[in-house]
Image (cartoon, rainbow, N blue to C red):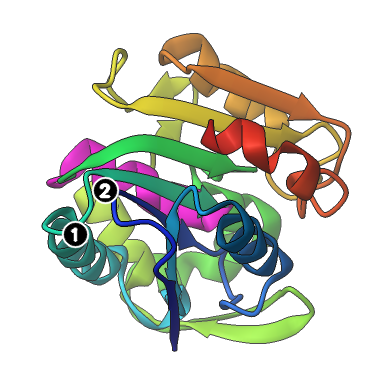
Amino acid sequence: MFVFDLNSEKNLWIHLHGFATDISGSKIETARKYFRETGHSSFFAMDMDYEKHTTTEVLDVLEALVLGFSERFENITLCGSSHGGYVASNLLRLRKKGKVKRLVLLAPSFETLGLIVKELGREKVSGWLEGKEPLRIVEEDREVEIIKDWARDIIEKGYEIIEGNEVRFPKDPDFEIVIMHGERDEIVPIERTHLFVSSVRVDKFLEVDDDHQLSETFEKYLPELYL
C-alpha cells in the first residue's frame, strides 16, 4: 500500500516509516496533513515490509523510486524514522540519490543489526546471523519474523553506519541533513546520534524532550524539519 499526495509540482517528501510498522503511523498522518494544508511539498510513503526483504532489496526499490521521482520533482526530501533512517542514510551513501537535496532523520538507527544483537544476545541470534534461520522478535507490541538472509546481507554489504565508535558516512555530504531525536529514547540511544553529529556535518540537530516515538513533539517541530 502507498499514499501519494500531489500538493506541489516542485517539491516532494518521501517518508520511510520505522521497522515492523506501516503507513498507518501517526507521523505519516501528521506530515500528510501539514503538507496538504501548506502546499509546501508533495508527499509519498509506502509500506516497506523491511522484515520480509533484505536491505539490498529495499535499497533497490527505493533507488528506483527516487530516480523515477527525480524526473518529475526538482527537490526531494528523504525522511526516515528509526530504521527508515538507516535505510535512507544507506541510500545516500551507497546509491544514486537523484534530486534528493535533504535527509531528515527521526530518532534514527545507525546500527539496526547491532541493536537487535545487543537486545537479544548473540547466542540467541547466532543461527540468524549465519543466514541459517529466520528470527522472531516482538516489535511495536507484535511478533515479527525477520527473514533468514536479513542479517547476513547487512554484514556482507557493510550497511551498519556506526560500528563501535566508527562512523561510516561522508563527512561533508552534498545534501542537507536534519536530525530530530528524543532525549528519553530507550530504543535507539541518542548517544549514537551524538557520535554521528560529531563526525558528520549536520545542518540542524533538534534534541527534544520526547521518547522514541516523538509523539509529543513531531507536529510542533515539523516546520523546522522542512524549512
Residue at (20%, 61%) from the top-left corner?
69
Residue at (19%, 59%) from the top-left corner?
63
Query: In the rendered structure, are the residues bearing label 2 and label 1 in contact, judged by CB atoms less than 8 Å apart?
Result: yes
Q: Is residue 98 left or right of residue 203?
A: left
| Quarter of the image with the N terminus in it | bottom left
Asked if residue 226 is positioned above or below residue 197 in the image, the reply reads below
| Residue to which mark 1 is pinned | 63
> Residue 185, percent across and down?
80, 42
Q: Which quarter of the figure has residue 209?
A: top right
Identify the mark at residue 191; answer none if there is no mark.
none
Instruction: Say which amino acid is labelled 1.
Output: Glu
| Residue to which mark 2 is pinned | 91
Camera-side residue: 120 or 102? 102
> Residue 204, percent across and down?
56, 20
Camera-side residue: 146 or 66? 66
Magenta segment boundaries in residue numbering = 82-96
